[in-house]
Amino acid sequence: MKREILPFKANDFYRFFALATALVLAAVGQFCWTQTVHPQTLSIGGCYYLGAVLLWGWALGPWIKDESTKVMSVLPKEFFLFSLIMVIALFMRTYQLDILPPGLFVDQGYEGYSALRILHEGWKPFYLDGFDNYAMVVYMLAAWFWFFGATALTLKLFFVFISLSGMVFIYWTFRQLSGPRIALITLFVLSVMRWHINFSRNAFPSIQVPFYMFGTLAFLLWGSQQNKRWPFIVAAFFFAGGFYTYQAYKVFPLLLTVYAVYEFVFRRKIFLANSKNILWFVGLSAMFLLPMVYDMSVNNHWGDRETTVSILPQLKDAHNFEPFFRVLGNTVMMFNRQGDNDPRHNLPGHRMLDDVSGVFLVLGLFFFIFKVCRREYFYVLAGFLIMSLPCILSNDGAHANRMLGTTPFIAFIIAASLSTLWGQAVTWNLEWGGKIFAVLLGIILVAMTVQNFNIYFTQQGSNLDCWRSYCVIGPALGEAVKEQGTGYDSFIADGFNYQSDYGLKFYDYSNLS
């Protein structure tokens, strides 16, 4: 049913003024939170944000119960917009990729070196002891090297490909839940999000987490909607495959269980109609996981990494919950105030989100509380909270790597806030309302892009700590040895720990002995 457009009344003017004031207060609050050298700015910024969310909630109060915000029909030029956003995402992940990051961290060198060993030495690992993970990704990387050659650039491009493929599944998932408008804005926000860009470019295995998560969700949603079995079978491959990747994925089954309970309670007819398909999904997933379960049982790999990074030992030593609340506080403030200090994960200490995204995340989270009963908002809020657990329950708060699974949900919250404002402008019956807001939306998205681009390619790209963390010396030595060719024997001085520098081993695999 087409939404009725009412005349612009005095009450609408008050709401418009409240929304504008809320955005100004939120901007001031965000500015205060960025001043990390002054501790008092945390509480001052919080007061501004409190005023913003109260005005925001009052102004959008009638809109909270409006179900017509979900636009499920195909948007004009939707494929063009999708393609344009994916081109932007590709550019942000490949521009200067040969020099940013400037080298390979030891873990990424290990991935490349292991893939070369599989290709040329017949090595057949199942579990990588030096990597604390299963070897599926290095087999995939070996196949990639076989097609495209083995260089540092092609290694990074492999993970860029995983990242972009994951974004397609993220778009498809959110389009099924909320329609193309929010899905397109979500895709754009994610495409320019520095947090996601950084991990797409640095060849970290954590970028696989969204790929397998949303590959699973996209096919499950499609299968349940169409009542077809093959999407459930494909989803089982994605679901089980995720367990052979990064440890943070292991909390995803909890999220999928929460979704299943929601579907059973609120959409029981559809859930029961797909009961046989669900059994196929569960059975195939269990079958695909049997090799991992067997290996864990025989070689005692149960929770090796999780035990090392868990917060439980700290809680036990402290005899109170202070370590937990410290980690929780650091994690909560990583988005808008002070982020990950690891130079491989972030510009050390810089907030994880750009300031525009940060503002709409705070306002959007408040908005989501009142809309949590709606299916798409429940899915996103549950995803954001549960995929935060790998960080919150660890011994290191504000850990961007373990929180990477939250980034698609963060992008959706931001996008839903913007989309709701757009829809509200249309209901005010201002002939220019939709067009003006479309221009305003463009300015907002450009501002996001510019700030993220500047921080990554200028500030982070020129930061010496970020450069040193990628073992620049390894590539330099590898190139020097390669220039000498096989006609010379090259020796590395004892002061350089060659045995642990897998970046050097990867760069000059054919020449070093």
Image (cartoon, grey):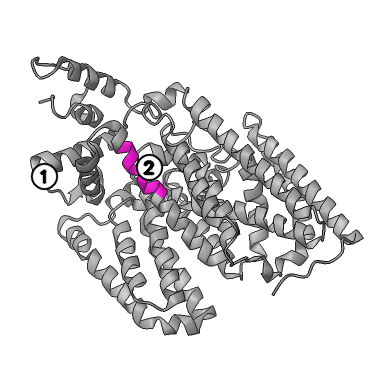
Left or right: 84 with respect to 93?
right
Residue 150 drawn at (x, y percent):
22, 35
Q: Identify which residue, 83 or 266, lies in the foreground.
A: 83
Query: Looking at the picture, which amino acid does disc 2 mark?
Result: Val
Q: Tag 2: Cα neighbours inside 10 Å, few (<14), some, or many (≥20)?
A: many
Q: Give x and y (percent) for residue 196.
A: 47, 43
Residue 340 visible (yes or no): yes
Magenta segment main secondary structure = helix
- Residue in view at x 59 percent, y 67 percent: 73
Residue type marked 1: Trp
- Identify whether 21 is placed above or below 217: above
Q: Which is more toward the observer, 283 or 180?
A: 180
Where are the magenta residues, as a range?
155-164
Residue corresponding to mark 1: 123
x, y percentage for residue 79?
A: 51, 55
- Residue for point 51% across, 74% down: 262
